[in-house]
Amino acid sequence: MNINEIKKKARDKMKKSVDAVRNEIVRIRTGKATTVLLEGIKVECYGSKVPLKQIANIGVPEARLLLIQPWDKNLLSEIEKAIFQSDLGLTPNNDGKVIRLPIPPLTEERRKELVKLVKKLGEDGKIAIRNVRRECNDELKKGEKSGEFSEDETQRGMKKIQDITDEYIEKINLIIVEKEKEILEI
């Protein structure tokens, strides 16, 4: 494996870590209604678990309200049950045609807890990125020992890997700052 392949591998894995952090952080409730909140919910439907968005139309008519309109009205109770079983902590209101999901405003204490959670998720992502860096540096050192790379090439490669690491850690920092601002906004 040459140095460019190692750098490409580092970029690919670090990008996946950033994407994973972004996907986790997006699901954190900020007091505003967004359809992303319901993305992980699966509903028991015709004998199998199906993602909610495949069996219902989900809308945001107001800043603090989600509206779920199933295509089959018989699924209303199953959708309601799936929302209760999720870890969202939201209470659905079923009127027989649609489900209204009010998003309550967050308390100050809850906001602080969410900020801590966001920072923890961000730190987990940074750890994953540092593990990729360590893995790639080990590959460079092995290549140097086996005579594949010179000492200078290895040092330049390790510096480039560090630059890539810094770039992706900065991306995670930006995601954290953005979400923190969103959570603390009233």
Image (cartoon, rainbow, N blue to C red):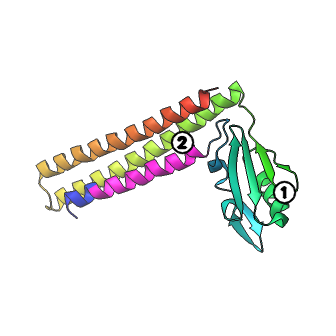
Q: Position of residue 91 (x, y in %)?
A: 81, 45
Judge whether residue 157 is colored magenta.
Answer: no
**Callout 1: SS:** loop
Foreground pick, 114 / 95: 95
- How far apart in space, not on screen, are marks 1 and 2 (Cα)? 38 Å
Foreground pick, 133 / 185: 185
Query: Magenta-highlighted stretch: main secondary structure?
Result: helix
Going by the image, does 8 lie left or right of 22? left
1 or 2: mark nearer the eye = 1
Q: Which residue is mark 1?
A: 97
The residue lying at 60 percent from left, 27 percent from top is: 184
Which residue occupies the extreme bottom position in the image? 47
Going by the image, does 154 lie left or right of 89? left
Q: Amino acid at mark 1?
A: Lys
The residue lying at 26 percent from left, 58 percent from top is: 6
Q: Amino acid at mark 2?
A: Leu
Report the quarter where the N terminus lies.
bottom left
Bounds of the magenta segment: 8-27
The residue lying at 57 percent from left, 45 percent from top is: 26
Report the quarter where the C terminus lies.
top right
Going by the image, does 12 lie left or right of 51? left
Res. 82 image quadrant = bottom right
Residue 86 in sight in this render: no
Judge whether residue 24 is colored magenta.
Answer: yes
Q: Which residue is mark 2?
A: 121
Res. 8 image quadrant = bottom left
The residue lying at 77 percent from left, 46 percent from top is: 101
Going by the image, does 170 lie left or right of 110? left
**Callout 2: SS:** helix
Crowding near pointer 2: few (<14 within 10 Å), some, many (20+)?
some
